[in-house]
Image: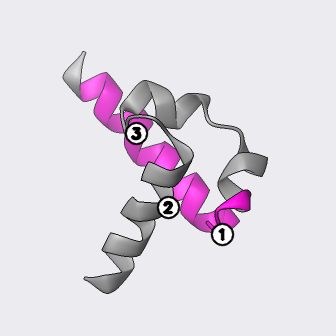
Amino acid sequence: MKAAYSVCNKLLTLLDEVRFDNILKCQEEASRSVALSKSKVVYIKDLAQKNKRWCS
């Protein structure tokens, strides 16, 4: 659970609002600046893309 809170806090630091569109627009370099690993960035963007399609 601590890991999930950590990732969420990093996303909140990076984005004004955690929304699918904001996650998908975020540059990998910016994500890395808040210490998100490349694999986490890929995973998070994949989830955002899949959920965006589901919610559309």
Q: Residue at x 48, y 45 (%)?
A: 46
Please name the residue that numbered disc 2 is placed on: 10
Query: Residue 48 bears which disc, if any?
Result: 3
Crowd tier of the residue under label 1, counting other residues whose Cα lies within 10 Å: few below 14, some 14–19, many 20 or above: few
Crowd tier of the residue under label 2, counting other residues whose Cα lies within 10 Å: few below 14, some 14–19, many 20 or above: some
Label 1 element class: loop
Image marks 1 and 2: residues in contact by CB distance under 8 Å: yes
Q: Work out whether mark 1 precedes mark 2 in sequence or the reverse, and give the earlier one.
A: 2
Q: CA distance from mark 2 to mark 3?
A: 16 Å
Image marks 3 and 1: residues in contact by CB distance under 8 Å: no
Which stretch appears magenta?
Answer: 33-54
Q: Work out whether mark 3 precedes mark 1 in sequence or the reverse, and give the earlier one.
A: 1
Q: Main secondary structure of the magenta part?
A: helix
For residue 9, what is the image quadrant? bottom left
- At which x and y percent is residue 1? 25, 82
Amino acid at pointer 1: Ala
Q: Quadrant of the C terminus?
A: top left
Label 3 element class: helix
Please name the residue that numbered disc 1 is placed on: 35
Amino acid at pointer 2: Lys
